[in-house]
Amino acid sequence: MTDTLPEFPGVRAERCPFDPPPRIQALQQDGPLTKVRLWDGSTPWLVTTHAEQKALLGHPQVSADVTRPGYPLSAPRAEGGSLSFILMDDPEHHRQRRMVQGAFTVRRVESMRPAVQRIVDGLIDDLLAGPKPVDLVEAFALPVPSLVICELLGVPYTDHDFFQDNSKTIIKRNVTAEERAAAGGRLFEYLDTLVGAKLDHPGDDLLSQVAGRVKAGELTRSQAAQMGVLLLIAGHETTANMIALGTLALLQNPAQLALLRDAGDPKAVAGAVEELLRYLNITHSGRRRVALADIEIAGQVIRAGEGMIMANDIANRDPGVFPHPDELDLTRDARRHVAFGFGVHQCLGQPLARLELQVVYGTLYRRIPTLALATGLDRVPFKHDGQVYGVYELPVTW
Ligand code: HEM
């Protein structure tokens, strides 16, 4: 019986560079909720519409606790190890999130704009002075958010090869549970050592503040290290993918790119960032949850213990909310998108991600107006195997 259910790969296995897999997007026409089959034979609900996703992500009986039976896993998971707060429920999730959220308020992040602008300008100077073609991922898309999050956390940027390699393994799907656990273990040990150093010699950075919570007895050292792992991974992987994939999408849509390049108004750039977040929705494996009680929604009953996947890439293409959703239209009002999720787990770093993308998109194409892809679109290696979508490399020239 479950064999007849559509399979949900949780990755863009098909070659559809900027769109959700058409086969999965078509499920939206069957109604807000459909049962799907996962890699392990489990059959959670796939929630495809904007309104129902928001209702469920904001529902008090919906859990993000990955250890609960019925949670729809995206890949095999090794038992044990400590969890970061993205995979916990309130009140513990809220208690830990509150300890770091002061660093991510809009005001605090806005004060970083000149520093982010300096980083972006410096990297573009280096690009222009260096050989071409060049891989934009390596030379620009990864360094921008990595430099910013390292500065904020107090992590030495000189270690970037180490943490970028291990982060990549953690969010790849086609690795074994053991390989993923080993990469997680290496990052955990690294952050644990750093937390230890900050305990002895605190600096003016977020990891030192977290270490201060350990000293005050509010966090165990292991919880502090795990929090560092979450912030370090979330802080660079996602934004890096948005920079590279966003650039590729714009190069494929020259009229939209021209609009952005010629936009003198920071509000137009900010609007373009929201539309690219909506259109590309790089967290394409969906927000995963499990029901704690029976929940009635859209004429269906989700039973206690049943898993659900909010396919936010498909909700961002909901025609009831975004007319002509498959078009990239930088002039539309896309602010209702769910690319940062919704509810208590809504992205903590979104003001920082927005700031970085506004500075990047508002600077890169203006300073390098002839930027062009240095290979065919069919040769660009997309992250078909990643839980976060993007490109592995983007050869560009000018
Ligand atoms: C364009 C870039 C980004 C995208 C698309 C993105 C997307 C998301 C999404 C969809 C969630 C919700 C997860 C869920 O509901 O299960 C999330 C959570 C989170 N994000 Fe981001 N993110 C981005 C950048 C960042 C940055 C720069 C940071 C900085 C450290 C960050 C830190 C976090 C954290 C800590 C959480 C967990 C929040 C919680 O559980 O309360 N993210 N992100």
Image: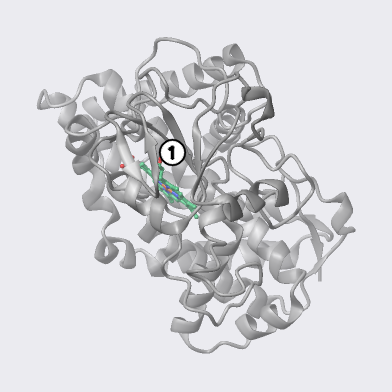
Q: Which residue is mark 1?
A: 232
Give 308 or 286, whichever is nearer the viewer: 308
Q: Give the answer, above or below, for where 342 lies relative to 120.
A: above
Determine if residue 202 is in view: no
Q: Which of the 4 quarters of the picture holds residue 292?
A: top left
Query: Does residue 149 appear in this view?
Result: yes
The answer to whether 62 appears left or right of 130 in the picture is left
Callout 1: SS: helix
* The C terminus sits in image quarter: bottom right
> x, y percentage for residue 14?
77, 44
Query: How many neighbours does mark 1 have within 10 angstroms: few (below 14), some (14-19), or many (20 or more)?
Result: many
The residue closer to the viewer here, 15 or 189, is: 15
Please tell me which residue is depicted at 67% across the width and 79% down the height of the picture.
256
At 60% from the left and 51% from the top, the residue drawn is 241
Point out the image quarter for the N terminus: top right
Name the spot of residue 156 as percent of width and height, x first.
45, 38
Q: Amino acid at mark 1?
A: Leu
Q: Residue at x 58, y 15 (%)?
A: 177
Q: Residue at x 51, y 17 (%)?
A: 77
Coordinates of residue 214 in the picture (x, y in percent):
18, 25
